Amino acid sequence: MRAYVFVHPLTAPLVWLIALGSGTSGGVLAPLLILGGALGCLAGQFLPGDAGFWAMIGMAGIMSGAMRAPMTGALFAAELTGQFAALPFCIAAAVAAYAVSVLLMRRSILTEKIARRGRHILQEYSVDALDLLQVRDLMTAEPETLGDYLSMGDVIDFFEKRAQHRSYPVVNRTGQLVGLVSRSDVLRWEVEGCDRATSLAESLSDASQPTAYPESLTGVVADLIVESGIGRIPIVERESRKVVGIITRQDLLKARHKVRTGETERTRHVGLLDINRRD
């Protein structure tokens, strides 16, 4: 006994759209061509000329717009159908679809899944290294902190005798961030003749300290450093506000330098010799 299953023509595109929207893996080329051809054929019922011609135009357009590759879409559609005489029309449709895609979509379908994982690629032809990394990749975990119960006199003595960094996060007894104390703050206290018995909790209670989260993009932190003028940003947990790390201006510059070095340096292996060259 044979069993026959009849599938509605809209089932396959619908299943593909649901799978793509859920973030699962799968090919995009064939479904794009099917969708484009079907839409083009449908539009061809109301447009002059053969419906097959408009199906080819639909394939070229949707592939070019979704993948941000206009020449690839036009040439692929013409080569797939063998209608090279219609290549100029495919190119026109591909360029128009690409222009609409750039205006309406932030990125192509090929980089959407990467962006959903927090690796945002804002410009696909020139990618900023800081837009590919998250703060947890660069931050110094478990940094040295100062308790808010310390007096200003204790902090002044600490910076004069034992401090190894320019600034330190200040936390309460549960590890939550209260503020940031730097060498410039200590110098200002000494010049103003502060009350050395005042605790950090009292002096920093109204301070507004910029922070970031481990999942934040380093590009956002770089903008925060520029806007605030603070070179060290504490990293806190989103829910508990506990300090889990710190990231500095130097960390961002090192990361950018490392990525640029990897893009410009190449190693060629010839036999047993390694020849380093710069492109």
Image (cartoon, grey):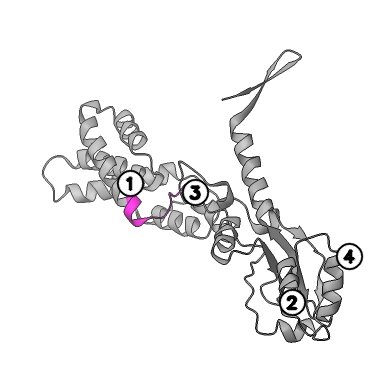
Q: Nearer the viewer, mark 2 or mark 1?
A: 2
Q: CA distance from mark 2 to mark 4?
A: 16 Å
Q: Amino acid at mark 3?
A: Thr
Q: Are marks 2 and 1 in contact (CB under 8 Å)?
A: no
Does the image show residue 276? Answer: yes
**Gap between marks 1 and 4 measured at Cα:** 66 Å
Which residue extends farthest left? 48
List x then y, in percent, for residue 138: 70, 54
- Between 193 and 276, the residue placed more toward the observer is 193
Q: Kindly state the secondary structure of the residue where label 4 is placed.
A: helix
Give the mark toward the camera: 1 or 3.
Answer: 3
Residue that lies at the very extreme toward the right in this rendered image: 161
How far, Cα to Cα, is label 3 from label 4?
Answer: 51 Å
Instruction: Report the residue marked by disc 4.
Output: 161
Would you say the magenta stretch is mainly helix, strand or loop? Answer: loop
The numbered dot on residue 111 is 3
Q: Which mark is residue 62?
A: 1
